Image (cartoon, rainbow, N blue to C red):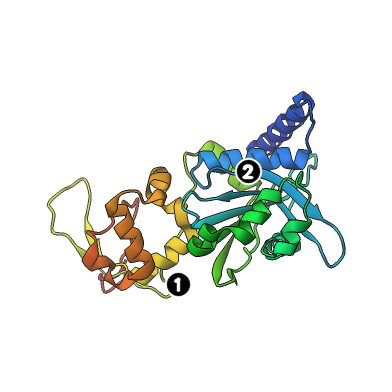
Amino acid sequence: MAQQELNLFYTDLLQDIRSEQLSNEEGGSLEQLFTNQAIVLLSDGGETADVRISFHESIVPRNRHKINAYAIADNYETLDLFVTIFKCTEEPTRVQKSDIDNAAKLLLSFLKKADNKEYADSLEESSEIFDFAHTLNASVELRESLVRINIFILTDGIYNGEIPSQKELNEIPVFFRVIDLNYLFNICEKEYVPIEIDFEQDGFQVPCIKADIDNPEYQSYLALIPGHALVSVYEQYGARLLEQNVRSFLQFTGKINQGIRRTILKEPHMFLAFNNGIAATADDLKLKKQKTDI
């Protein structure tokens, strides 16, 4: 990506949110307007859905926490939380790892506090997070169904550092993602942003058998992916793996989809026996020397 293109994208983005602020009778903060712009792009890319822009922040020492937006899946299985680092500089700037870690800490702090009924009751009814906080600590459906929490750290800066490592909150895995200016630019320029999965780095091998097909157009391989490897990938990337079928699959309204979901979550070792497999295409393929692993 050319730096000039990124700078132009950044300039247009700031102009859009400033214009929106001026045209809005209630004004609105530039940070929340940027948050909304970023979430619209993520939603269009199928990476989240039905997000509510809801800002709350406490800067009281030893009680600092923050949230900019949230989304609860229709089936209550996933919770998307958003926190924003808004620089609003004349040109794109670098975001430090300390900024990312601090943003993650602030949102985790909110999540822990909102799980407490006393905290929810202390909020004014006019608070943008009043309903959400009460849902977090009182919803039976959410407590019984929640299997993953996604924390999105949004920023108008550029970040090339490490992503905060996975954590657990009340035995629920918490995954972090950083959505920076580069990522937002890529969403605008492409229909989707590729996911890079390194099975070997996660300790998995992918044994394969080449199909004896006389077809000059393509080669075909039968590969065996362990069920627990699919569980690991699904937990890490969730809806992004399903691209255009995200919403229909995650709703699991059909018997087949419900069966696939149940196998992935409850009996990953039976995935091969219970399901016909997953078809995937590749631009390129590299085999190891023994030609049995991809």
The amino acid type, in three-letter code, at marker 1 is Asp
> In the drawing, what numbered circle is on residue 52?
2
The residue at the point 51 percent across, 56 percent down is 78
The quadrant of the image that shows the C terminus is: bottom left
The local secondary structure at tag 1 comes to: loop
Q: Earlier in the sequence, mark 1 or mark 2?
A: 2
Q: Position of residue 47 (x, y in %)?
A: 51, 47
Residue displayed at 36% across by 51% down: 252
Dot 1: few (<14), some (14–19), or many (≥20) neighbours within 10 Å?
few
Above/below status of 84 relative to 199: above
Relative image position of residue 39 (x, y in whole percent): 61, 42
Q: CA distance from mark 1 to mark 2?
A: 34 Å
Mark 2 neighbour class, 10 Å CA radius: few under 14, some 14 to 19, many 20 or more: some
Relative horizontal placement of residue 233, taking residue 79 as reference (left or right):
left
Q: Is residue 43 visible?
A: yes
196 or 39, nearer to the observer: 39
Number of residue marks: 2
Q: Position of residue 271 (x, y in %)?
A: 28, 66
Q: Which residue is most to the right?
A: 61
Q: Secondary structure at mark 2?
A: strand
The residue drawn where x is 20% and y is 62% is 210
- Residue under label 1: 202
